[in-house]
Amino acid sequence: MYYIFVCLLIILFVIFYEYDVVCCRKIIELEEELKIVSNNMKSLEIAEQEVFLLYFAFKLLQQSIPSRNTITHTSALRAV
């Protein structure tokens, strides 16, 4: 009787140990995926900042260059 009890305890221990190992592996896999997602988010944030900087640089450049209508109007005034 004692032998059967010990065998059952050993079997339960092995089952729970294997379950624990599988859970730990899954946790490690999820942590690695989380790191990848985090790095992707950082890359997207940096790319977003670069796009905003380029947009504002373009807007400043656009404001500093006179439009075609202004150039034509100024040329017409000079011709008079």
Image (spheres, grey):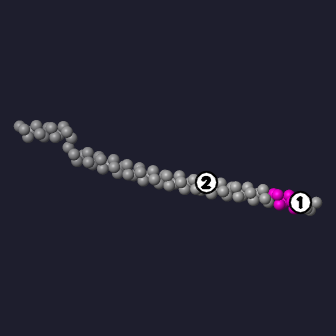
Going by the image, does 71 lie left or right of 34?
A: left
Q: Which mark is residue 26?
A: none
Q: Position of residue 13 (x, y in %)?
A: 79, 60
**Range of the magenta residues?**
4-12
The residue that mark 2 highlights is 30
Q: Position of residue 23 (x, y in %)?
A: 69, 55
Going by the image, does 45 lie left or right of 21?
A: left
Q: Position of residue 31 (x, y in %)?
A: 59, 56
Query: In the image, what residue type sits under mark 1?
Result: Phe
| 13 and 65: which is toward the camera | 13
The residue that mark 1 highlights is 5
| Residue at the image position 32 percent from the left and 49 percent from the top | 56
Going by the image, does 75 lie left or right of 60?
A: left
Is residue 69 one of those drawn in magenta? no
Q: CA distance from mark 1 to mark 2?
A: 37 Å
| Residue at the image position 89 percent from the left and 60 percent from the top | 5
Quick one: quadrant of the N terminus? bottom right
Up-down relation of residue 9 to residue 58 (above or below): below
